[in-house]
Image (cartoon, coloured by chain):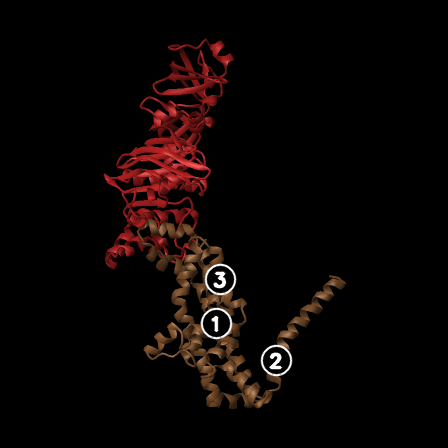
Amino acid sequence: MLELKNISKTFSGFSLDDISFTAEQGSYFVLLGPSGAGKSLTLEIIAGLVRPDRGSVVLNGRDITHTEIHHRPVGLVFQEHCVFPHLSVRENIAYPLKIRKRKARDIKKLVNRLAGEMNIEPLLDRNPESLSGGELQRVTLARILAADPGVILLDEPLSSLDVQLQQELRSLLKDLNKKGRTIIHVTHNFEETIVLADKVAVMKDGKIIQSGTKDEVFHHPGSEFVARLTGIKNYFRSVFEWDGNQVFARISDDIRIRVLPEEKISKGFIIITGEDVILSCEHITSSVTNSFRGVVTDVIPLFNGYEIAVDTGVTFYSKISGESFEKLGIHNGKPLWVSFKAAGVRLLASHISL
Amino acid sequence: MYSLQPFKLLLILLSGVILLFIIAPVLGIYLSTTPLEIFETAKDEEVFNSIWLTVWTSLAATLIFALAAVPFSYLLARKDFPLKRLLTGLIDLPIVIPHTAAGIALLGFISRDSAIGRLGSAIGLDFVGNPAGIIIAMAFVSVPFLIHAARNGFEMVPLKLEKAARNLGASSSKVFLTISLPLAWRSIVSGLVMMFARGMSEFGAVVIIAYHPMVAPVLIYERFGAFGLKYARPVAALFIIVSLIVFMILRLISSRKKNAGT
């Protein structure tokens, strides 16, 4: 368990103000915010690269606020890979073990095991120069795991990778977390947050402006800033099912959603923007392939219209104009049809079948 | 086809003058010295000893002073402290002052009357007129070259690699030895060779502190003064060959691709 208590740090022109949060043992904690919010600085304080002016960092009951960097059981993965260019992949992964003066035989065994876990065994004797961005991040992760830290800190680990590699690495990170690793992940990307997070803290201008479980923060944003940043309320954990050459995302026992086929995805999330969700009083015959019947459970006024929550067994959120709101005569408890196109559904993989 | 504009012609002409200015005198030495003369000179015990003395004292100066100069370069590359700019300027002092003046300054520092000189005498080490003095004189004028090269090398090592190593459990000294030093190594080696070559060619500071035993530049000067051009020339020719070999090694090392990381 990692606890930050009232961490503050002032630079000229920027300050981190009273940052407090708790990441439970084995949880996946995402610090979400735009660039310049102080997310990376928070990680650097946890890792000891920057000393806070006030406050404390407590890891598994031990106050490490004033512990030297190299004595902290904290593994930091930087935005861009930090693989040592003068060492082979094997030597890179072995680096923290050699520092700890482990026996050569143990080092060899552990390096091979970690390389297996990260799927980089064939690369062990290569030079970092010849590796791709995704491979380098895997080497970085294997090397961090060799140090066996109490918590892993990830600073925008996916942002320098292309979409395909992002999916693979997301699934790798999720697996690490499932094996019990506590992870603090910094990002500005709400899709990453949806797929990976248990708990979310939203940061802005050096402050945490909202924190809680992913559903609390995404479904009940406390301010317009958070609502814009988190963006999407229609996200559903899904298992993807093939039916002939059609693909469906199963989001509950009763509900499955027609989506456009995408290779390799087996599990993950689907997201649908509120603007793509159409409300109607009657079932409409149209090119729209997904339609569900439900009742209105919530009406949230927006500055340019309304957001309507409709419970169909799961809750969909639709953004509509004031004019449509009047026309449909919407009120709590009113039965409505919810429709959207298969093409309007975005797929985010957390597991891919290779 | 490019037309030869007057300006282009002028550039080529001036470049030719400069190249000739550098090459001609050196080439001239070999045109007016027969290989036999050079061979005979190499067998002259006094000449051989003086060249050997020059090589080993310069090597010793380089290696001994590198022990402090390389960590100092790391400090300059990585840390900020008050008066850093002034200090950086001071490093160039030995390069900008006349080397005979540097020799005079050093002599006051290590002569038998000084504290360091007395300390040396007490353990039987006399700097003046001794290889130890030569080493100090050579190091004084050549160590800035090493410091600059090593500092550049360390500055090219990405800071985040050092941070990553610290995060993986390495102490500051371990980071220096396992990350910074290996990654800056090529620049440091090139600095070492430069310092070595510069030390070998030093005349002004060395001649003030130690006329005897004679390093090669002093010997050349002495032969010229005592016997004239004809006798100084073969020694100069031989010593230039030795220096050129060192220079070629330097170019070979520094022309390889830089090895500091991304």
Q: Residue furthest front?
A: B113
Question: Chain for mark 3?
Answer: B
The answer to which image quadrant residue B67 occupies is bottom left
Viewer-nearest residue: B140 or A227: B140
Which label number is shown at residue A258? none
Judging by the rendered image, the residue that carries numbered circle 1 is B105
Q: How many marks?
A: 3
The chain drawn in brown is: B
What residue is shown with label 2? B27
Residue sitting at 41 percent across and 80 percent down?
B130
Answer yes or no: is residue A352 visible.
no
Q: Colour of chain A?
A: red
Where disc 1 sits, the SS reads helix
Write down the quadrant of residue A170 in the picture.
Answer: top left
Q: Which residue lies under the disc numbered 3?
A: B90
Q: Nearer the viewer, mark 3 or mark 1?
A: 1
Which chain is indicated by disc 1? B
- The answer for how far apart the CA atoms under marks 3 and 1 are is 15 Å
The mark nearer the N terminus, 3 or 2, is 2
Could you tell whether A234 is left or right of B171 in the image? right
Mark 2: which amino acid?
A: Leu
Q: Secondary structure at mark 3?
A: helix
